[in-house]
Image: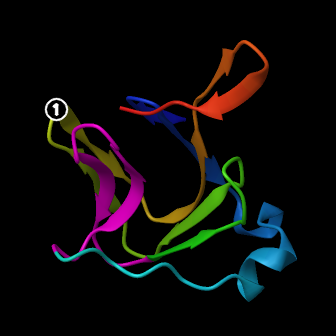
Amino acid sequence: MYRQGDVLIVPTAEAAVPPRVAALAAQPRDARGRLVLALGEVTGHAHAVVGPGELRREAGPFGAAWLRLPEGGRVVHEEHAAIPLPKGWYRVVRQREYAPGAVRVVAD
């Protein structure tokens, strides 16, 4: 497993990727050509992947994202060291926190 800030990246065997992921639309890259895993609402910084691949997101604030890296890649962020990722599939999960009366995704 890999973690960068509030983002958890879990290697997943291709056979374990749910069939519904194939029907999800691929997310567009940002202006810098990165696949953005999480965007900091306060700072504008992003946890993003550099390299060839695709990112697909399930609906809703707690939906998982699925990352496919056919050649590997790197997770980058303005305030963290880069993390190299080998080729393969990954499930991307945002950290959650409890606030009285609600559960929410952690925001930078």
Whether residue 29 sits left or right of residue 14 in the image: it is left
Q: Quadrant of the C terminus?
A: top left
**Circle 1 residues within 10 Å: few <14, some 14–19, many ≥20:** few
Instruction: In the displayed orientation, state which residue is furthest to the right.
Output: 19
- The residue closer to the viewer here, 41 or 83, is 41
Helix, strand or loop at label 1? It is loop
Q: Position of residue 64 (x, y in %)?
A: 68, 54
Query: Residue 79's image quarter?
Result: top left
Q: Name above or below for residue 98 compared with residue 23.
A: above
Whether residue 64 sits left or right of residue 8 in the image: it is right
Instruction: In the displayed orientation, state which residue is furthest to the top.
Output: 100
- The residue closer to the viewer here, 67 or 31, is 31
Which residue does the numbered mark 1 point to in the structure image? 79
Q: How is the image coloured?
A: rainbow
Q: Position of residue 44 (x, y in %)?
A: 23, 47
Whether residue 2 sits left or right of residue 66 in the image: it is left
Whether residue 56 sits left or right of residue 44 in the image: it is right
Q: Quadrant of the N terminus?
A: top right
Q: Does 68 appear in magenta? A: no
Q: Name above or below for residue 28 compared with residue 106.
A: below
Stretch in magenta:
32-53
Residue appearing at x 72%, y 58% in the figure:
60
Numbered label tally: 1
Q: Name above or below for residue 69 compared with residue 78.
A: below
Query: What amino acid does circle 1 point to?
Result: Glu
Residue appearing at x 83%, y 68% in the figure:
18
Residue appearing at x 58%, y 31% in the figure:
95
Q: Position of residue 26 (x, y in %)?
A: 54, 83
Q: Position of residue 62 (x, y in %)?
A: 70, 47
